Image: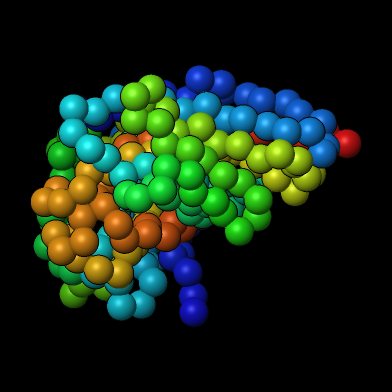
Amino acid sequence: AQSVTQLDSQVPVFEEAPVELRCNYSSSVSVYLFWYVQYPNQGLQLLLKYLSGSTLVESINGFEAEFNKSQTSFHLRKPSVHISDTAEYFCAVSLPLPWYNKLIFGAGTRLAVHP
Amino acid sequence: EAGVTQFPSHSVIEKGQTVTLRCDPISGHDNLYWYRRVMGKEIKFLLHFVKESKQDESGMPNNRFLAERTGGTYSTLKVQPAELEDSGVYFCASSQESGGRLGGTDTQYFGPGTRLTVL
């Protein structure tokens, strides 16, 4: 069975500081990896995903995540955060073919960016 | 293009009552998923429809939960009778392609969720 662990439930940070949200997963087979973000009063939005190829993936708003197979991690980073990045972030995995793609989520990390 | 919509946004009911949650996926999306988040815990998969057929219902907690997807369009999730532990946020998501063909590559688009409180 697959599982996802997000090591920090809350991460407070000052504006323009760097941030890393940690995610580790467990699986006996290869998985796809995702980061979703939930802004207040909104649904989850896909931030970025790793399927194959380059282990470093980027989002359009400056976040990046690196797939590390040996450490079974997919940490999310941003070099300089903004107030608008305040949200809850979810790491998730899904199985590749021939399995259907239900998502298995971590418990979420609340990022609070302070001025 | 309209996103995934869910109704109601909030529901407060008493233990033993019945509640029906509705999800309207993005038009043309074959795949529809239900997930649930109990307070402070991870979001958990409940079930997956491909068009009108249940593809995977391994996450449904018990037979008090009944999901349907009429004509492969909108879906309802009924809880009858509701128990205290059913409280949480119920999310619906949809994706376009058949998961059997693309596996885990297809982006799931989520609705805002329905917050269910059972007193």
Residue A1: percent from the left, percent from the top?
19, 27
Residue A1's place in the image compared with A76, above or below, is above
Q: Position of residue A90 (x, y in %)?
A: 49, 38
Question: x, y percentage for residue A93?
Answer: 33, 39
User: Is B8 situated left or right of A94 in this image?
Assistant: right
- Asked if residue A2 is positioned above or below residue B23 in the image, the reply reads above
Horizontal side of A8 relative to A96 (left or right) equals right
Q: Nearer the viewer, residue A110 or A57?
A: A57
How many labels, in total? 0
Residue A2's quadrant in the figure? top left
Q: Is residue A46 visible?
A: yes
Q: In this view, does B83 lie to the left or right of A63?
A: left
For this orientation, the residue located farthest to the right is A115
Q: Does the image show residue B117?
A: no
Which one is in front, B20 or A9? A9
Report the residue at 21% width, 61% height from top.
B102
At x 30%, y 78%, the residue is: B28
Determine the residue positioned at 82% across, 39% down: A16
Residue A21 percent across, percent down from the top left: 57, 30
Taking the spot 30% from the left edge, 69% from the top edge, the residue there is: B96
Q: How is the image coloured?
A: rainbow
